[in-house]
Amino acid sequence: MSTILTIADLKDLARRRVPKMFFDYADSGAWTESTYRANEEDFGKIKFRQRVLVDMSNRSLESTMIGEKVAMPVALAPTGMTGMQHADGEMLAAQAAEEFGVPFTLSTMSICSIEDVASVTRKPFWFQLYVLRDKDFVLSLIDRAKAAKCSALVLTLDLQILGQRHKDVRNGLSAPPRMTLANVIDMAIRPRWCLGMAGTPRRTFRNIVGHAKGVGDVASLASWTTEQFDQHLSWKDVTWIKERWGGKLILKGILDKEDALMAAKTGADAIIVSNHGGRQLDGASSSIMALEEIADAVGDSIEVHMDGGIRSGQDVLKALCLGAKGTYIGRPFLYGLGALGKEGVTKALEIIRKEMDITLALCGKRLATDMGKDQLRR
Ligand SMILES: Cc1cc2nc3c(=O)[nH]c(=O)nc-3n(C[C@H](O)[C@H](O)[C@H](O)COP(=O)(O)O)c2cc1C
């Protein structure tokens, strides 16, 4: 553990411990992966102003996201199949987030169900909704999230059709994995992962199987999911979803200022500037490069969050400087989970916290919430 100092260290360990199919599922973007790479690389182009002889005592990273107090403005992003990175992955990650004091967002496409996560947490978590064609199922998901006392609904807008990730096609990605010779060998050399999986009943999409009509088993699930994303989704749908939900609503997947202005008009509580971690429209702008224009366009009309490419506390601060009130990490916590289970998720958060704290001090600031464009060299 003492040699793990960066998110990249967690990634290296996860690569060794998680079967290739699932490691690749996390570490991939659409087509050429140019947007996936840009998400990380573009953070490197932004430089801080170093300030000296400023009292740097009593620093704080605390803030709020949609009115909820957070230990630092870094939530765990919704990620599908998290329970395949490590047995019971969503439950462990939710517990790690709760103990750390940051929000956890459960994906519709999770392995552990809404009810599974609710059973091991005490504070409310957030639920991410995909709008599927089976509207009865969508309504039941919303109702289940309400019953589990989720405190925000994160509605994903950028996946009405699935971007192609070549690695997943080549690996024949599925949950649970098919018992081909290649998969069996790949899993056999990762006994820790296998033992975990053998010890849990949670090995398929538990928000869906047994809840959606016509999906009684895993075989029917694969075809069901690909057919289910609703290509008719429009701004009008946000209205009925908001009404049915009745609580805090976050719109995820905005990358254009026109869309951001439309989102603000819906009365939602926040938007997430995001390109789905470079997994959807390859060739789209990195999230960090899209952020400033969007934040300036919407002003105070809606809270702005961002995700995509955050690999350090410095990246979080850069996003705050450019107008984000909150950020999310996807892969960093997945790598932590794959590497070391719950402890690894905590480690990912600790790494980011430490980097944020030291950077804040060296920029001559005491409060993360005070970071603004003035702290960047441009
Ligand atoms: C393996 C994986 C699965 C994902 N699944 C979902 C999902 O089910 N729903 C969703 O809204 N976003 C999903 N995303 C996108 C993340 O919520 C987030 O936008 C992205 O991971 C942020 O980029 P980062 O991984 O560079 O931090 C997924 C991302 C990854 C890496």
Image: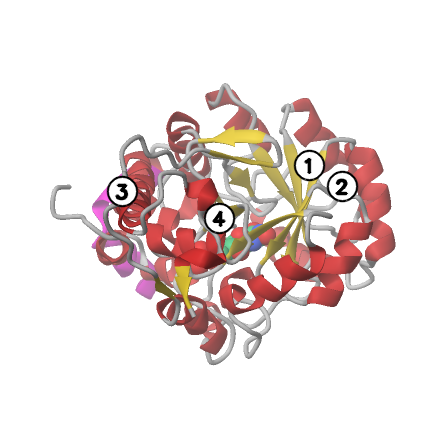
Q: Quadrant of the C terminus?
A: bottom left
Q: Name the residue that disc number 2 marks.
A: 137
**Is 182 within the magenta?**
yes
Placement of 313 over or under 99, stated as above or below: below
**Mark 4 → mark 1, Cα distance in angstroms:** 29 Å
Residue at 55% across / 79% down in the picture? 283
Q: Secondary structure at mark 1?
A: loop
Residue at 76% across / 51% down in the picture? 264
Task: Specify whether residue 67 is in view.
Answer: yes
Instruction: Indicate the amino acid at tag 4.
Output: Tyr
Nearer-N-terminus badge (2/4): 2
- Mark carried by residue 354: 3
Nearer-N-terminus badge (4/1): 1
Instruction: Judge depth for marks 4 and 1 and give the one in front.
Output: 4
Beta carbon at label 3 within 8 Å of ligand 1: no
Q: Residue 125 vs residue 346: left or right?
A: right
| Residue 134 x, y percent position in the rendering | 79, 48
| Residue 58 x, y percent position in the rendering | 31, 30
Instruction: Indicate the amino acid at tag 3.
Output: Lys
**Mark 1 → mark 2, Cα distance in angstroms:** 7 Å
Q: Secondary structure at mark 2?
A: helix
Disc 2 crowd, CA 10 A, few/some/many (<14, 14-19, 20+):
some
Q: Name the residue that disc number 4 marks.
A: 328
Camera-side residue of 138 and 258: 258
Labelled pair 1, 2 in contact (Cβ < 8 Å): yes
Disc 3 crowd, CA 10 A, few/some/many (<14, 14-19, 20+):
some
- Magenta residues (range): 181-197
Outermost top residue? 122
Labelled pair 4, 1 in contact (Cβ < 8 Å): no
Instruction: Indicate the amino acid at tag 2.
Output: Phe
| Residue 258 x, y percent position in the rendering | 75, 66
**Is 91 within the magenta?**
no
